[in-house]
Amino acid sequence: MALKNKTDYTNIPKEKFEFYKRDESIHDKKLETKPVGYFKDAMRRFAKNKSSVIAAYIILALVLFAIFVPVFCENNYTRAASDTTYLQYSKLLPKSSLFAWAGWDGCTDETLSEGDYLRREAIALETGHNPTAKLYESFQDPANDNGTYYKVRTDSYLKNGMIYLTLPESDYLAIQEWQNETGVQVIYPAVDTSSLKIATLKNDANIWYQCTNKGLPKLDKNGNFVPIYKTTGSDNYDSIRIAGDDGSYRYALVGGTSSAKSYQVRVFTYTYFQYRYGHEPSFLFGTNAYGQDILTRLAKAVRFSILLALGVSAINLFIGAIYGAVEGYYGGIIDLTMERISDILNGVPFVVVVTLFQLHLASKVGVVVSFLFAFVLTGWVGMASRVRMQFYRFKNQEYILAARTLGARDSRLMFKHIFPNALGTIITGSILSIPGVIFSESNMTYLGIVNLDSATMSSLGSMLSAGKPLLSTYPHIIFFPALVISLLMISFNLFGNGLRDAFNPSLRGTED
Amino acid sequence: MYMVKYVIKRIALMFFVLFTIMTMSFVLVKMLPNIDAEQFGKDAALVAQRREMMGYNKPILVQYGIFLKRSILGGDWGMSEALYRMQDVWTVFVSKLPATLMVNVCSIFLSIPIGLLLGIYAALKKNKWQDYTISTLVMVFISVPSFVYAFLIQYILCFKLKLFPLQLKAGTDWFSPAMLKSAVPAILSLSFGSIAGFARYTRAELSEVLTSDFMLLARTKGLTRSQATIRHAMRNSMVPIFPMILGEFVGIMGGSLIIEQIFGVPGVGQLFLNSINGRDYNFFMLLTVFYTLIGLVAGIVVDISYGIVDPRIRMGER
């Protein structure tokens, strides 16, 4: 059989032949899987690193916080620069209606002397808002003249009670109109201070009752406060009146000239806030010693930190890449000279650079710009040396020689052929420099070498240093900035480390 | 021979860099507006006379020549103009060194053993839960800035529990028990970060050495795991760690500006800060030179100690 077949093959007639796949072109089979490039592979490996992904989400959350909180939460209150009413709302504790059950209710536990306790009772009696949220117990302290003391939970938003304000007629009438519309009382009756002997008591808006020279109330037989409301005067008040007013109480002390009258009134800070800003006072992170809202200031500080860090690392990337590329590519005497220059810049302590820039430039180009200059002056050195190393690694490879033989110019070789190979390291390096910038920024602003604080602007460092003296009494002022800067640093470090591992080809496949 | 040449080259280079930085900062400081000499009252003639005497009216380069001759060669850094009126700058500076050194030396002696032990333990337990716990903590402690620890320590240990005083004790009895006790918060807040740094570095180096071929050989020739680790892995992993420790030792002279300010340590960092705020340029100049020198010396010490620890580098096989 086999033999017969063999003879057959030698004599196949010509017409039995036909062309195979004559109408199609022949090529390799197409790959069925998608090609995985360097960056795609890096991203895939990054996504496997759970902590870095979480860090990336935290960064995203902080960025959104920094972008949107000032947009949505910034009301007239936060922007108030010329109006100093906000000083009345200083050191308020964090309050959130959502988390009130967890103690986030703007209240604090404290022990009060009898005088302070009765003072707050008086506020509660007059306004119906009780600053004492809860009375735990009262006790006699034998060590302190057997005085009565009260353990209470105080609402920091109510305890300041009344203040004296002097208003022009238009404002005075506007408040009355608002009172009639909403049924919320802001202005409380004026007080006849002639029975009070001490100046501090006369000026204290919370005293509406007879009291001793020590500020303790003189109670009547039934243990009630004895009001000393003013009944003579010429204010034009026809709005809400407090209980017990038979129509004789006066509500303002009129002063000024007949053409421009001024009204000195006692207003309740809590409801006055409602009148001014349209909602009850409630600050998620509390307020600082000047009554500024910590939430929005913090968001602005984070915004500034991130923007500065991004700006600095972008500029450093740009300068460092070009400088390092030139150094690494040309080598020799050029490299040597340029290395000495970066040695010198690297040797200057950062704090000295910042100080000199602040002293020399801050008055000319502004604090922020001179701060940025200080970061840029020495910051690019690290990036340059990183790029230089990469260039030393790649510049003698065969493909560079091939490209050079084909006539490629130096700049083309540098940025088209070598640079893309170094890109992974460069990106990682500049992301890992971000936490460093944030840290230095907060350090310098904390120490007050750079001062960015103003009514509408703040920085993490200056918020921390402002909270430092109040650490023991009002820890919330320092807590939130400290928390946010820790989160920022941890998440940027984790994120950068994840990227570094992902871009490192030698680690490829080791995790699987 | 190679080593000697290398050391000489590095030191020469260091002086070149130092000289350049010193020149630049001198010129920049001299270009700043001067505070009027208040101690002479508002008498313009006296002020002018004093400016003439101090050499402020000469060209800056001539002033720089005088400065070099007096400060670098003669050791006279001038008088304090604002902070410690009419006291010798150098004497004040030297009197500030002990506080900084005390706090920082304690911190480094606390953090080196703990950091190394944690790092070694993590490397030996690599990819087990002990390693993950240590690595996570190290990550957190490295990232969180030292002043955040300072606030936490001050609030919890000093204020709530009342274990330590809020500020460093006054006085110059640097190593008395009371002084050491009052320095504990500052030492702790400095240490957390460096413990984490040492632990991370040690873990990385040791775990790399543990997987190398000579470790396999050591086990093959019959050493137990602990013998091989102590005799071979540890010694090799110390090659990069030892220079780092030496570098830290030089670096601690500078102190930490922020920790010194928080805990009221009357040290060099605080002096520098005060010299900036008080515009005391003589202090500023001295401390700039001091800080620059520390940074440069630390770098050189690290590089040279590589050669001391590792004979391969010493013999010129770079």
Image (tube, grey):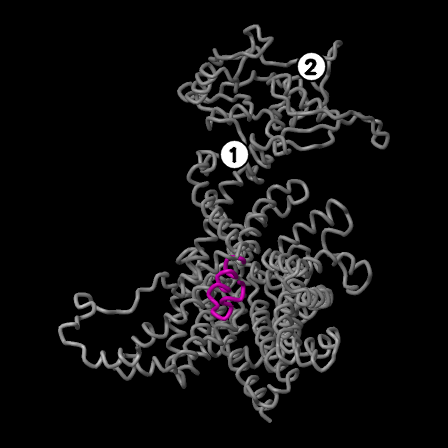
Is B92 displayed left or right of A317 in the figure?
right
- In the rendered structure, find residue A225 and report the number of the disc placed on it: 2
From this viewpoint, is residue A440 visible? yes
On the same chain, marks 2 and 1? The answer is yes
* Marked residue chain, label 1: A
**Mark 1 packing: few (<14 Cα in 10 Å), some, or many (20+)?**
some
Residue A177 belongs to magenta span: no
**What span is colored magenta in the figure?**
A494-512
Q: What residue type is labelled 1?
A: Tyr
Q: Is residue A172 above or below residue A238?
A: below
Q: Main secondary structure of the magenta part?
A: helix
From the viewer's side, name the closer residue of A199 and A57.
A57
Q: How far apart are marks 2 and 1 (CA)?
A: 31 Å
Residue A507 belongs to magenta span: yes
From the viewer's side, name the closer residue of A20 and B238.
A20
Is A168 displayed left or right of A228 in the figure?
left
Position of residue A351 measured from the top left corner of the image (x, y, whole percent)? 54, 64
Position of residue A481 measured from the top left corner of the image (x, y, whole percent)? 56, 47
**Mark 2 packing: few (<14 Cα in 10 Å), some, or many (20+)?**
some
For the view shown, which residue lies furthest in the left direction?
A: A15
* Residue beneath disc 1: A86
Local SS, label 1: helix
Position of residue A187 measured from the top left corner of the image (x, y, whole percent)? 53, 19
For the view shown, which residue lies furthest in the bottom direction?
A: B1
For the view shown, which residue lies furthest in the right direction?
A: A142
Q: Is residue A250 above or below residue A38?
A: above
Local SS, label 2: loop
From this viewpoint, is residue B85 visible? no
- The part of the image, by quadrant, that contains residue A23 is bottom left
